[in-house]
Amino acid sequence: MTNNTADVIIIGAGLSGIGAACHLRQHNPEESVLVLESRHELGGTWSLFKYPGIRSDSDMYTFGYSFKTWDDTKTLASGESIMQYIREAADEYKVHELIRYHQELSSSNFDTETGRWTLQVINPETKEVSEYNCKYLYICTGYYKYDKGYTPEFAGSENFKGPIIHPQQWPEDCDYTNKKVVVIGSGATAVTLLPAMVDKTKHITMLQRSPTYIGALPSEDTKAIFLKKWLPKKLSYGLVRIKNISFSLFFFNACRKWPNFFKGLLIREAKNSLNSRVPIDPHFIPSYKPWDQRFCAAPDGDLFKVLRDGQASVVTDHIERFTNNGILLKSGKSLDADIIVTATGLDLVAAGGTTFSVDDEQFDISQQVMYKGIMLSNLPNSVIFSGYTNASWTLKVNLTSQYTSRVLKHMRKNKLKYFSPELKDLNIEKEPLLNLDSGYINRSKHTFPQQGTALPWKMYQNYFYDYLTLNYKKLDDGNLKFHS
């Protein structure tokens, strides 16, 4: 008979879930663990997305796990190599045997009398419902819907004679050889697609409503290569990791402090990369300040190169409607297309869309406040794995695992029943949890928990500060309550 009971149940076998399971194997081996994954394989985003050129837009020395070195020379790695990295971690820490596939969390209820969660889980294929039971619940589902991406309503889309493809549902049989392709969007996906597809297409155009800050970054870290040549692998990985975290934090804070200077600097760099072959205005002068939205990386300036060489084009305009053979723009111009790719973003969802209850009373997570960016106020024995918006996602995931390890050890040592962050000041000033002004965030931020304006309810988006507070400050801070 299958045992559906464990001390810890992790929801999601993506980068976060596998990392959390590996950490438990290392630091909390006394806790039994199950990992529930709604899809057919591990990997999360890196298994789901199949579009050409899929890669990380964060460097792998910070995007990788703290406990497993990144040994490839590429710092902005391909989706395939990231998948291999996750599989290797699961192999090394014997996580594969913990995973149950085709198990999607539907609802969860915490009983304060027993100090345990009861989970209702459905098999998406057979619709069979199972019940699981655990003491601690780890939510490692990321922040977007896996079934579909976000596509706006485009007038006349039903008239277009070719395929309209969202990158999240890229068809395996998509043949764009010698085709005219229009990619709608200016974010990381669009910036990736153009250089990846250009060699096969007849022509490819990035159609953007407004520009994004795009920087040419080296695909290989020469300092990392040098250090790895002369130092032990773990030491060199750690040093490069600290270097890259420091630089990303400096760049983010500097952009916030001196936005006009860095806006000018980034625009000048883009202009130099384009070598006057493409007008900088209006295509590469964003209307917002640097880091009001996420910064896009172009490995070795590949996007600028294909635009500079005339292999691809960028158009800044608004869409009037789709036509039979392309797109009519509000300026009156038309773009011919055989294929339209809507790189228009994600549909965000908090905690994988599951419903929570405590003692059979419905629990609305949108009305709660995040504690240390890790737990929800008033939600017992649960941890929500979320990443930074200004740095690699996995940096915060690693810190979350380390902090939670301390909490679990404390719970076991003192034979405690449950913990729960308790917000004493009900009149605390609140602000959105996700602090960027991107469209995909603004569409869904009302469904997400909030953050406060003071510690420990505020997220400062600062790795070094979080490292100290999560690893060394005492657990019982008057806000995290422990119940026996």
Image: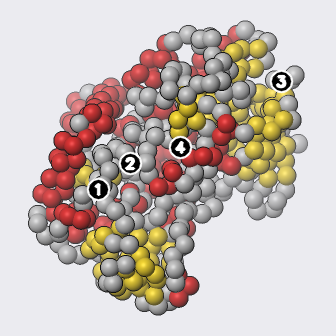
Q: Are marks 3 and 4 in contact (CB under 8 Å)?
A: no
Name the front one of labels 3 and 4. 3
- Whichever of callouts 2 and 3 sits on the residue coming sooner in the sequence is 3
Q: Is residue 100 visible?
A: no
Q: Amino acid at mark 3?
A: Thr
Q: Is residue 9 above or below residue 287?
A: above
Crowd around label 3: few <14 · some 14–19 · many ≥20 (10 Å): some
Q: Earlier in the sequence, mark 2 or mark 1?
A: 1
- Name the mark nearer the viewer: 2 or 3: 2
The numbered mark, 3 or 4, whose residue comes first in the sequence reads 4
Mark seen at residue 293: 2
Question: Considering only order in the chain, which callout, 1 or 3, is on the residue closer to the N terminus?
Answer: 3
Q: CA distance from mark 2 to mark 1?
A: 10 Å
Residue tagged by mark 1?
286
Q: Amino acid at mark 4?
A: Leu
Tag 2: amino acid: Gln
Q: Residue at x 30, y 67 (%)?
A: 195
Residue designated by label 3:
112
Q: Amino acid at mark 1?
A: Pro
Residue 239: quarter of image: top left
Distance Cα–Cα, label 2 vs label 4: 23 Å
Say which of 80 and 325 sits in front: 325
Disc number lying in front (2 or 4): 2
Nearer mark to the viewer, of 1 and 4: 1
Q: Residue at x 85, y 31 (%)?
A: 359
Residue hosting label 4 = 15
The image quadrant of residue 227 is top left
Q: Locate the N terminus by quadrant.
A: top right
